[in-house]
Image: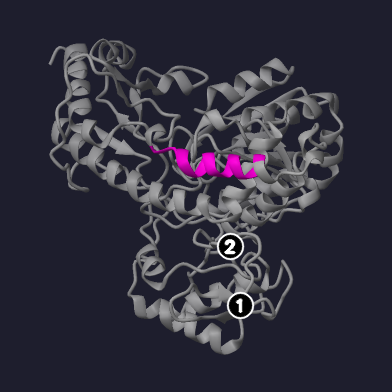
Amino acid sequence: MAITRAKLAWHTLLDVEGTGPLHERLTRALRHAIRTGRLGPGSALPPSRALAVDLGCSRWVVTQAYEQLVAEGYLTARTGSATVVRTDAPAGTPGDTRDGTGDGTRGGTSSGSAGSNGARPYGNRTAQPPTVRPGGQGHATGPARASVGTPYDLAPGLPDLREFPRRRWAEAVRTQLATVSYTDLGYPPPGGAPQLRQVLADYLRRCRGAHPRTGDLLITAGVTDGVTQLGRLLRAEGHTHIGVEDPGWTRLREALERVGLEPVGIPVDADGLRVDELAGDPRVRAVVVTPAHQFPAGVVLGPRRRAALLAWARQVDGIVLEDDYDAEFRYDRRPVGTLQGTDPARVALLGSLSKTLSPAVGIGWLLPPGRWAAALRETPEHRTSGPPVIDQLALASFVETGGYDRHLRAARHRYRHRRDALVAALGASLPRCELSGVAAGLHLVLHLEPATPAATVVARAAARGVRVADLDGYRLRPDPTRPALVLGYGNLPDNAVVAAVERLTDAISSATGR
């Protein structure tokens, strides 16, 4: 069977919540993904053992679901090869819920649309992420001690740069250079290379529950670039203020200020953005949020907040800028679908490769509401700011042939192991400190004891070769009564976890005099 776009569908967003045996729920979820087009014809499903590990269930559950869908004509299976979606599989429509399950892309308050903060996969759900005392999770594996003066990178914002898929990326670039038509070597069309836009549209539909129209998807140089372009358009349409999460990503606030918008801080709590605070400011009709994994608090925007946020956008004729930050990496909770998939007319979805591959690739995407897409394509900034065409075509090939899915799968296993080791090391060295935001992403928050001078800790850790970030650096207004550090573990070598924590502990002791 010929396999078309998105050949490997190993990273598909599935909602298996509901009633009934798990194998029946999985069957319904897969059937729904096929009927709605998120699993397109020729998509290769993960091996039954691999999907069983992801679901935390027995292999029998998966094989039963696959066999049922083979019998129904949705899948085809051959010994020694992948189970794939049939090219003539029964089709539905993007909003089809005839299976009675939903897939988390419609209805902001459905059981699977928002996930639960901190909930373990497919287990009992909790209303918010647990505040975890470090210790008791995972195991340190006896890392080698590094020499004094070696820098330990515990700052957030970077993936594991040592694991960039150099060989596969180089092969993708070489293939494009050898096969690309000479007509593709000119300036890219407005919006980006059509091949990449189509592949990314398929990927976002399948993996993130988005509702993309290929013609509306725009290729950018990253999330900051996309936010800047949208900010200029907002300013041109008369917006003067824009809501931002507090605490939140400083670089995005600065980008909005540069285009003439005044950021208005909206508090974040255990359920994410405080929509009631947003609705209380009549100056604001646009807001930037990170609903899948809030930076830096690490919480998920709860189901009621998601519904309230979209209701607010409709009421004020506004727009939500959804930064899909860290959505690919989750460990102890269900994956969360996009807000854009629930209301494409009110949400602009932004994403990039900076946390999954590397910031050096310099490729991102922007999926705005339809009425904004044409205007953005024609702006001078968009026509001149896109990434190189060869890199765009290389990424299209990397995603289409399954290389991106394989890379993400390996990365999730690696980061989970590293997260567990870091939590265990912090628990052994700093038992009086609490952790939050550990269920997903590439960072966590270490809450220091009251009266601890966080800024002093950061400086003394740097003197010991350890890079960490003060949570106050992401707040619009510093709050020394709640000192905390944001610790990233994406770019920290596995064999440096214990040594880095020892030095950080020493810096905290030095700053507090204990």
Q: Amino acid at mark 2?
A: Lys
Mark 2 → mark 1, Cα distance in angstroms = 27 Å
Q: Does dot 2 land on a helix, a strand or a loop?
A: loop
Q: Does dot 1 land on a helix, a strand or a loop?
A: loop
- Disc number for residue 311: none
N-terminal label among 2 and 1? 2
Q: Amino acid at mark 1?
A: Gly
Residue drawn 48% across the image and 77% down it: 25
* Nearer to us in this view, 5 or 207: 5
Viewer can see residue 413: yes
Q: Are marks 2 and 1 in contact (CB under 8 Å)?
A: no
Query: What quarter of the picture does the N terminus occupy?
Result: bottom right
Task: Name the spot of residue 169 as percent of width and height, x first.
Answer: 52, 41
Magenta residues, as a range? 163-177
In this view, the residue farthest toward the front is 178
463 vs 469: above or below: above
Which image quadrant for residue 41? bottom right
Q: Which residue is mark 1?
A: 100
Task: Name the spot of residue 20 as percent of width and height, x first.
Answer: 45, 81
Q: Is residue 164 magenta?
A: yes
Specify whether 144 is left or right of 165.
left
Q: Which residue is mark 2?
A: 7
Q: Which secondary structure class fits the magenta region best?
A: helix
Q: Is residue 174 magenta?
A: yes
* Nearer to us in this view, 65 or 175: 175
Q: Which of the two discs, 2 and 1, sits closer to the camera? A: 2
